[in-house]
Image (cartoon, rainbow, N blue to C red):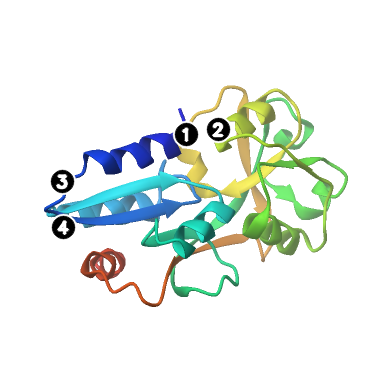
Amino acid sequence: MDLSYRGTNAGVLARPDRERLRVGVACALHRGALRQQIARFRRQAPDVDLMIEDLDEADLDAGLTDGRLDLAIAPYGARGWRSSPLWSEPLLVFMAEGHRLSADNAVNAASLTEIPIILAGGGALEQAIVAALGGRPRFLHYAVQRDNLFDLVGMGFGVTLAGSSMMGAVYPGVCARPLESEAGWLSYCAYWAGQNERPALRRFLEARDDA
C-alpha cells in the first residue's frame, strides 16, 4: 500500500473549518514512541485533522521547504530546520530465518563487515549504521518501499538494520537480533520551519511531554 498516496489524498477530505496539521514521517508506526505520541495527540486535540504522509528524508525536506508539511519526523541529522528531539531506539539486525547470524542471541558489529547490508535509500539511517559498526560496511541500495525491503531480506538478498519500532510488523521469513554496539542507537527528531507558528504544531510537540 502506498501510504504517501493515502496521506496526500486525505487532505482533500479534511474539513476546511478545522485546524489541520500535516506531518511527514520517515519511520515505522508499527509500535513505539511515535505511535503513542500520535494516539495522545488525537485524544487531546480532537479538533485538529492530523494528516500523515510516509516519505523519505529528501521528500520531507522538500515538503518543509515548499510549505506542504508542517512537521517532519526523521532520524537525527543536520537539516537546517528548527528541531526537537523525540526518542531513541536500539538498532536491530534483521535477517532471513536460517541465516548463519540467527544462531546467536545477538550480532557483533564485526560480524557485519563482509555481509551485504541492504537499504532503501540512505541518509541519517545509513550514517547511524556506519557509526554503530565503527566503519562503512558493504551497502546495497534498493529503490523500494520499506516493506518491500524487508521482503527482500526474507528472500535472502542480505541483512538490514533498523530501529526497534520495526518489530511491530511481521514479515514472512524474517527474524531480528540485537546489535552488540554501544553506538547502536537511532535517534529521531521533529523538524519544522522557523516561521511556522501553528498552534497545532505546538500541541503535537507538547503531547510528547505528556507521556
Q: Disc 1 designates what residue?
A: 169
Residue located beneath label 2 in the image: 147
Earlier along the polypeptide chain: callout 4 or callout 2?
A: 4
Q: Earlier in the sequence, mark 4 or mark 3?
A: 3
Badge 1 local density, few (<14 within 10 Å), some, or many (20+)?
few
Of residues 73 and 17, the one drawn nearer to the viewer in this rendering:
17
The Cα–Cα distance between marks 3 and 1, rounded to whole angstroms, is 32 Å
Instruction: Inspect this view and state whether residue 113 appears.
Output: yes
Which residue is at the front of the view, 28 or 7? 7
Q: What's the distance in space between the residues labelled 4 and 3, CA to CA?
A: 15 Å
Q: Amino acid at mark 2?
A: Asp
Tell me, yes or no, if residue 211 can be seen here.
no
Q: Residue at x 44, y 39 (%)?
A: 4
Residue 166 % position (x, y): 51, 42
Q: Quadrant of residue 120?
A: top right
Residue 160 in percent (x, y) is at: 68, 41
- Residue bearing mark 4: 45
Q: Are discs 2 and 1 less than 8 Å apart at CB?
A: yes
**Is 205 on the left or on the right of 43, as rendered?**
right
Which of the two marks, 2 or 1, is nearer to us in this view?
A: 2
* Res. 15 mark: 3
Q: Is residue 154 left or right of residue 165?
A: right
Tag in front: 3 or 1: 3
How far apart marks 2 and 1 lie (CA) works out to 9 Å
Q: Tag 3: residue type?
A: Arg
Amino acid at circle 4 = Ala
